[in-house]
Image (tube, rainbow, N blue to C red):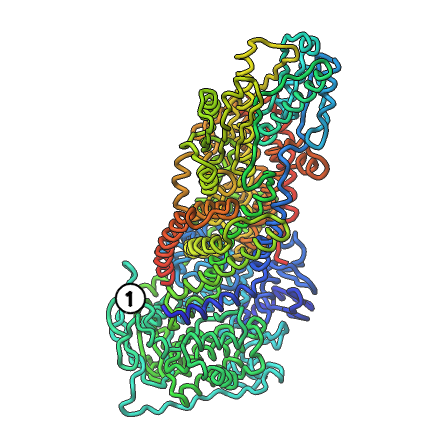
């Protein structure tokens, strides 16, 4: 392998990319607008949650409760009869149905500990899970306030002080942009290298390269470095400009260390791009393969939801994917400010996975050239 | 050839008046006015890109007419009714080897499909195919995939497919381009035989081979979208006072194109004594598994010779070239360049060779200068010498004016010169050219060959060139004819002609080929007399064509789609297990349950009460306790490393303070790196804290006081509040939307992109037959997916199914009909496969995930979201799916959700048919 050839061919790849408007737009979009919108467009979990109330008490307390639910968190409550409650929930019209029993206020004041029934449609994922707590605390708040006028509150002997480390406000606008940068790094490195190879094949230029004094290794390494470099630069700019400057998200830890980790991740994923391109052969087939490969890589790597809550075998299986290690590394460095002493196992894992991918891709690439 | 006079009596088969056509701003045809005589063989001649193909596709009705008027077989071709009624009388074979064939389908299956398009029943198709395959000599290859046929065989198969319905007008667009001389000869003989059997049939052919055109009855010479001249070959020669059609064509060209053209003459090569051998092959053999691609090939090429290489596609030419250049190590034998054996690992050998491949294959993203520069550098020319060399190349190949232009902006002739310049930039001693002039007009071709002559005679460059053109072959010093991996003959053109005592070089080659293949096979191809015609009832065929819906034609598409899908591993995988993979990923990946979180305690008190507090957390199913924390540094380090997501600090004196009822403070640190997880952790901790307090309070006072009340929470339909129960029934509708619709879109768009959609344009198939035929296999596949996904949800994800399988199954079937129909609608405005993949994913996923009640119920949406949510079919199937899985609902409750799905099917199919075009535009 001669470095001069690797360099020349890599420069040629960069020219090719520079003159492909579709891919350029894709790169710019995935590292700017897509990151920006991910931070802002993160939907509130509770938005116009449909709630219905069966008021069998018709007392001051119950009307207090009814008026406590209002948009935008909840829709204006529908007042329904008890008979309607089940059918409305069956039809999926309400997520919450609150049943205030007869004589609730009287029993409450008499210390008979009456029960309010809260029905939650637990098939409604996010609304049900986070909304239940809201409904409870709103109801409790209203009742407590009502009771306050009747008696003094008991003192609380122990107080719980909660502090969130690294992200005191638990601002999702901090988490999502970085998660999206990680996603874009994987996606683009695979697409760019894959497309670079398929472009050569479709134009017949790969045949041309082979009669020149260049080896398959040189061709492959040139694609890896050039496309990897593009993604590395784009992701660094994206983090510094879009994430830190525009979105004002504090980045912890050593940026250089993160870039080193990114470079290793890119080594592995660009090899994967070459491999997939040799399997697919044409752009459409490559697109279909991507559908089946990218999504599992991203969703199961722990970038979106915590790895701990996935089944054991998936956690183990995903250790073979570079993404898993990269996500751990990126989160440790950028969120928690971890240093080399913490993330070295991930760097090592990325090296090993990258080397294995490189070996298999090169073998496959050589066969592909025959 | 039959006399043109016979046709003249019938009147013209096609009448063109002032026909024009533009592709965007490019004018392809302008002011074409022609009467094409019936009952004879009409040839369209001219190089690539002059509008021959456009003209033919207009006559065939495959392309919509933009300007002017064309009458074919006595009616206006712009009238869709006339097209439908006459389509059984017309057959169109588009340009490109096997362009309208399906490469993964076998010979028989291809022909069978075409028969089906004309509504022929199985028995009729079988009989016709047997006849056609017999007369074309394809019988023994009936089971071979079309993609694995040689070029000549592909064209014969294309002809079979075109002739399966006994057309009166046969339109062939460059049927013999890229086919070896023998196959070409056989092809024309076949056409002649067919014309003898069906004397009334008119044939319109376009060709770039002038020597073929000489055999036709009547010619149309075209250039730059205009007709130069018409008439019989004799008339054209007479008019231009030339000896052959090549010269006649050049003479017919307008003055500015002819300028600079000089009749080509290559000075004869003087053989020298003891000359150096540049290329030498000795018994070269290449085997791929059982297949012998090249068998025992030997030749010697002296330095400075122009050596021609002829042969059909796939005869081993390219493999031989690869062995000579050291790209492929030979299985047996040796290749020598300048006396030393070729070592594939030796990069030095490659530096002595320049290579120019078929068509244009340089980097279109690099400018002319950059292309030259890159190649110079890759060949490791000394840095200082490069600019001079590039300037020299530019001068020599006349590229100076276009040095900074992009290759795409250049004409084919200039690009050809650029390719040659690139191949020559490192001053190689050997130049290997693979069909360098295909598609180049005669004037540019002559210019190209004069450069080659110059290189050979002046610079002593050895040129190894492959070609299909006989007049080019005649220009070579020596030629080799290759067939099926063997070199049949190798000598000077004159000697080859003499050897066979033939009139022309082509004649000689055909004889060599016939000898090699063996008389037996050639005879079999010729002698198989066509059995008596199957009672061809033209009236019945026409009545069939007029039918609005024909199951036979629809099933032809269904059958073909199924076969293709089965033979495409990536699409088949996606169709069968794609949705399963995605369900698996989403079901496990998008998980809102937070369990098995790690936590540790910094207990500065270490009393029974403090331990009791910690136990409260450790005992829950959400948390796993880690070794206790020693101090703040330890806490900080472990949290940074992500070892713990929750740390609890219990202050000294906690137990004492609680016992006395004095205020105490417990601190909890949560890892906020993942905000969603942190919020859940906070909820858990707060809940457990409250429970612990209540417990302590009860222990102390022991009874309820005024103001106590309970909130009883009933998590309905999913009592354990598991994510999978909530997610899986909602994800099934989304997967059944995305993948089936994407596959349906692809099935239509693939045909558009690969060009086989032309079969839909020129046959009597109606839009509904086409759409439903393509949809059917995907509905079946999606139904299979329903079963797989449901089973997976129940048995693997353990989501309880409480409703009625019958109701759910019926709804799911209806729903996949809807989703595949949506695919058909989307396909009408997408033209490339890659856009189809990403476009469909976007168009289906966004409304399905955002507005269909998967996350937020439609009832809580407003404005645009509510509008989309209410009309999007997925909304209703999500209701049915959740109702059936979790809510134990039957038809009585879910009935109203069926109505929108039932309305959607005819609506979407109607839209799909309305948007689908029956002609190219």
> What residue lies at 49% left-to-right and 21% top-to-bottom?
B655
Place of residue B542 in the rendered image (x, y in percent of width and height, measured from the top left): 58, 50
- Please state which of residues B297 and B614 is positioned toward the viewer in this rendering: B614
Place of residue B154 in the rendered image (x, y in percent of width and height, measured from the top left): 43, 61
Which quadrant of the figure has residue B253?
A: bottom right
Which quadrant of the figure has residue A308?
A: top left
Q: Is residue A365 left or right of residue B89?
A: left
Q: Dot 1 surroundings within 10 Å: few (below 14), some, or many (20 or more)? A: many
Mark yes or no: residue A280 visible: no
Residue B490, relative to residue A94: is it above or below? Answer: below
Kind of element beneath mark 1: strand
- Please state which of residues B660 and B402 is positioned toward the viewer in this rendering: B660
Mark yes or no: residue B155 visible: yes
Residue at which label 1 appears: B286
- Please state which of residues B242 and B325 is positioned toward the viewer in this rendering: B325
Tag 1 subunit: B
Place of residue B231 in the rendered image (x, y in percent of width and height, measured from the top left): 59, 76
Residue B114, relative to residue B627: is it above or below? Answer: below
Residue A134, relative to residue A241: is it above or below? Answer: above
Q: Quadrant of the C terminus of chain B?
A: bottom right
């Amino acid at each position: 392998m001669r470095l001069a050839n690797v360099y020349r061919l890599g420069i040629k790849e960069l020219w090719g990319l520079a003159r492909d408007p579709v891919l350029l737009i894709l790169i710019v979009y995935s590292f700017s607008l897509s990151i920006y919108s991910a931070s802002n467009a993160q939907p509130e979990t509770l938005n116009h949650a449909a709630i219905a109330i069966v008021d069998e008490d018709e007392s001051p307390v119950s009307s207090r409760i009814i008026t406590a639910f209002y948009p935008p968190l909840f829709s204006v409550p529908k007042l329904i009869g008890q008979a309607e409650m089940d059918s409305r929930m069956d039809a999926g019209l309400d997520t919450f149905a609150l049943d205030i029993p007869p004589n609730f206020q009287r029993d409450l004041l008499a210390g008979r500990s009456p029960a309010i029934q809260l029905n939650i449609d637990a098939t409604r994922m996010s609304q049900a899970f986070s909304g239940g707590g809201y409904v409870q605390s709103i109801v409790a708040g209203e009742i407590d306030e009502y009771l306050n006028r009747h008696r003094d509150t008991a003192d609380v002997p122990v107080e719980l002080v909660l502090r969130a480390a690294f992200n005191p406000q638990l601002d999702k606008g901090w988490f999502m942009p970085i998660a999206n940068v990680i996603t874009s790094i994987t996606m683009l490195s695979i697409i760019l290298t894959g497309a670079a190879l398929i472009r050569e094949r479709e134009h017949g230029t790969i045949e041309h390269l082979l009669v020149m004094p260049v080896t398959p290794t040189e061709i492959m390494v040139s694609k890896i470095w050039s496309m990897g470099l593009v993604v590395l630069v784009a992701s660094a700019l994206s983090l510094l400009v879009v994430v830190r400057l525009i979105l004002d998200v504090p980045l912890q830890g050593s940026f250089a260390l993160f870039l080193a980790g990114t470079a290793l991740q890119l080594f592995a994923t660009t090899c994967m791009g070459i491999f997939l391109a040799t399997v697919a052969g044409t752009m459409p087939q490559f697109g279909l393969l991507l559908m089946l490969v990218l999504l599992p890589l991203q969703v199961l790597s722990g970038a979106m939801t915590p790895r701990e809550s996935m089944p054991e075998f998936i956690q183990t299986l995903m250790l073979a994917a570079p993404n898993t290690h990269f996500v751990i590394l990126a989160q440790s460095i950028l969120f928690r400010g971890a240093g080399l002493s913490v993330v070295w196992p991930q760097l090592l894992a990325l090296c090993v996975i990258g080397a294995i991918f490189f070996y298999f891709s090169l073998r496959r690439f050589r066969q592909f050239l025959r | 050839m039959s006399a043109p006079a016979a046709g003249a009596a019938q009147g013209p088969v096609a009448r063109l008046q002032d026909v024009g056509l533009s592709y965007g701003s490019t004018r392809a045809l302008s002011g074409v006015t022609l009467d094409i005589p019936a009952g004879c063989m009409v040839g369209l001649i001219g190089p690539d890109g002059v509008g021959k193909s456009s003209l033919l596709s207009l006559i065939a009705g495959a392309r919509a007419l933009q300007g002017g008027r064309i009458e074919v077989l006595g009616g206006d071709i712009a009238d869709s009714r006339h097209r439908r009624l006459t389509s059984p009388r017309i057959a169109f074979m588009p340009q490109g080897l096997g362009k309208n064939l399906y490469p993964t389908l076998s010979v028989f299956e291809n022909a069978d499909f075409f028969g089906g398009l004309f509504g022929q029943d199985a028995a009729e198709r079988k009989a016709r195919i047997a006849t056609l395959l017999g007369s074309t000599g394809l019988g023994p290859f009936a089971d071979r995939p079309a993609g694995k046929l040689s070029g000549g065989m592909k064209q014969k198969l294309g002809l079979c497919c075109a002739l399966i319905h006994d057309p009166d007008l046969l339109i062939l667009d460059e049927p013999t381009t890229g086919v070896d001389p023998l196959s070409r000869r056989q092809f024309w003989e076949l056409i002649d035989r067919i014309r003898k059997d069906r004397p009334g049939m008119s044939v319109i052919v376009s060709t770039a081979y002038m020597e073929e055109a000489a055999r036709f009855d009547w010619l149309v010479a075209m250039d730059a979208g205009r007709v130069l001249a018409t008439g019989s070959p004799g008339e054209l020669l007479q008019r231009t006072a030339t000896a052959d059609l090549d010269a006649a064509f050049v003479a017919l060209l307008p003055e500015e194109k002819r300028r600079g053209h000089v009749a080509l003459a290559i000075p004869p090569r003087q053989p020298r004594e003891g000359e150096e051998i540049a290329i030498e092959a000795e018994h070269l053999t290449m085997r791929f598994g059982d297949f012998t691609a090249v068998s025992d090939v030997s030749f010697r090429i002296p330095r400075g010779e122009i050596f021609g290489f002829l042969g059909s596609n796939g005869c081993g030419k390219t493999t031989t070239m690869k062995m000579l250049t050291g790209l492929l190590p030979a299985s047996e034998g040796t290749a020598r360049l300048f006396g030393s054996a070729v070592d594939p690992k030796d990069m030095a050998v490659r530096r002595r060779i320049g290579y120019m491949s078929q068509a244009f294959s340089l980097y279109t993203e690099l400018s002319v200068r950059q292309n030259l520069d890159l190649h110079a550098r890759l060949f490791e020319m000394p840095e200082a010498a490069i600019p001079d060399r590039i300037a020299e190349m530019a001068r020599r190949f006349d590229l100076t004016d276009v040095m900074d232009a992009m290759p795409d902006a250049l004409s084919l002739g200039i690009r050809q010169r650029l390719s040659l310049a690139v191949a020559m930039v490192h001053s190689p001693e050997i130049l290997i050219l693979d069909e360098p002039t295909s598609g180049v007009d005669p004037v540019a071709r002559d210019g190209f060959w004069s450069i080659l002559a110059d290189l050979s005679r002046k610079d002593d460059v050895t040129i190894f060139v492959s070609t299909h053109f006989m007049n080019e072959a005649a220009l070579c010093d020596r030629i080799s004819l290759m067939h099926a991996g063997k070199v049949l003959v190798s000598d000077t053109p004159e000697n080859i002609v003499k050897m066979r005592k033939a009139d022309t070089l082509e004649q000689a080659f055909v004889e060599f080929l016939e000898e090699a293949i063996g008389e037996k096979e050639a005879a079999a191809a010729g002698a198989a007399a066509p059995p008596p015609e199957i009672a061809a009832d033209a009236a019945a065929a026409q009545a069939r064509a007029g039918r609005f819906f024909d199951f036979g034609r629809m099933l032809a598409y269904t059958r073909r789609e199924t076969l293709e899908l089965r033979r495409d591993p990536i699409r088949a995988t996606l169709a069968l297990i794609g949705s399963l993979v995605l369900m698996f990923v989403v079901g496990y990946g998008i998980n809102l349950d937070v369990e098995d979180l790690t936590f540790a305690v910094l207990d500065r008190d270490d009393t029974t009460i403090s331990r009791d507090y910690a136990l409260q957390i450790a005992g829950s199913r959400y948390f796993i306790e880690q070794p206790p924390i020693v101090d703040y540094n330890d806490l900080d380090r472990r949290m940074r490393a992500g070892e713990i997501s929750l740390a609890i600090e219990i202050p000294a004196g906690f137990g004492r303070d609680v016992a006395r009822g004095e205020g105490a403070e417990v601190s909890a640190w949560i890892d906020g790196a993942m905000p969603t997880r942190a919020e859940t952790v906070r909820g858990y901790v707060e809940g457990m804290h409250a429970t612990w307090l209540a417990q302590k309070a009860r222990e102390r006072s022991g009874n309820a006081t005024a103001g106590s009340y309970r909130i009883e929470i009933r998590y309905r339909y999913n009592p354990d509040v598991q994510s999978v129960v909530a997610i899986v029934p909602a994800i099934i509708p989304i997967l059944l939307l995305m993948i089936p619709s994407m596959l349906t879109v692809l099935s239509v768009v693939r045909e558009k992109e690969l060009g086989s959609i032309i079969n839909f344009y020129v046959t009597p198939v109606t839009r509904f037959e086409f759409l439903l035929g393509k949809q059917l296999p995907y509905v079946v596949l999606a139904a299979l997916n329903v079963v797989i996904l449901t089973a997976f949800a129940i048995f693997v994800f353990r989501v309880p199914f409480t409703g009625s399988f019958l109701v759910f199954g019926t709804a799911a079937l209806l729903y996949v009909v809807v989703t595949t129909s949506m695919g058909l609608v989307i396909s009408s405005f997408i033209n490339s496969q890659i856009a189809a993949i990403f476009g469909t994913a976007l168009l289906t996923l966004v409304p399905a995930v955002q507005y269909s009640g998967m996350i937020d119920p439609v009832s809580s949406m407003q404005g645009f979201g509510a509008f989309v949510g209410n009309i999007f079919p997925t909304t209703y199937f999500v209701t049915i799916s959740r109702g059936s899985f979790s809510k134990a609902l039957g038809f009585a409750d879910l009935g109203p959700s069926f109505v929108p799905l039932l309305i959607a099917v005819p609506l979407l199919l109607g839209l799909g048919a309305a948007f689908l075009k029956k002609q190219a535009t």
